[in-house]
Amino acid sequence: MASANPLNAIALIRRDLPTPDIDLPELAGRHGYRLVYTVVTDAGAVVTTLALVRHTEEWNARAVVVPGLEHAYIVRQVITHFAALVTPTRLYPCGHRWPADTLRCEPTK
């Protein structure tokens, strides 16, 4: 599925989660993207979102590549609002609508 002129993508890796041995540039290439930058963070949702938006705009990226959905889980709705989300098991296109039950906030104790 790789194209002659791949679109740019950035990666997101969370330091606070286990990272499987995934070749992110190869994963991006399988879906027609070229990995140009990697965001490595252990920050919360707001700071992670700000970093992703900044670097997506800076690199004109059309996708965010992650080593597993759990790395993007807290910001998945934001990512698919402005870019595709590429995981090892699935591509969530830009504009993907997440089921309402996955967006529900759980009360804290």
Image (spheres, rainbow, N blue to C red):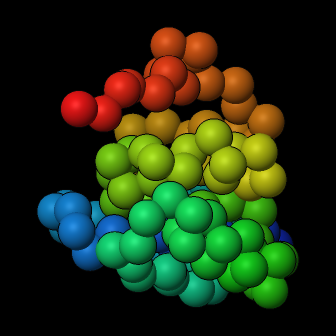
Question: Looking at the image, is 36 positioned above or below residue 11?
Answer: below
Residue at point 67%, 49% (across, down): 78
Viewer-nearest residue: 92 or 105: 105
Q: In this view, does 88 lie to the left or right of 76?
A: left
Q: Position of residue 22 (x, y in %)?
A: 28, 65
Q: How many marks?
A: 0
- Frontmost residue, 37 versus 27: 37
Relative image position of residue 85 (x, y in whole percent): 59, 49
- Identify the residue shown where x is 57% and y is 64%: 46
The residue sitting at the front extreme is 109
Q: Considering only vertical position in the picture, is 50 above or below 79?
A: below
Q: Which of 8 and 58 is in front in this view?
A: 58
x and y percentages locating residue 108 in the rendered image:
30, 33
| Residue at left offset 50%, top offset 59% | 45
* Viewer can see residue 29: no
Q: Quadrant of residue 100 in the image?
A: top right
Q: Residue at x 79, y 53 (%)?
A: 82
Q: Is residue 82 something that shows in the picture?
A: yes
Q: In which quarter of the image is residue 80?
A: top right
Indicate left or right for 89 with 85 as reference. Answer: left
Residue 6 horizontal side relative to residue 30, left or right: right
Q: In which quarter of the image is the C terminus?
A: top left
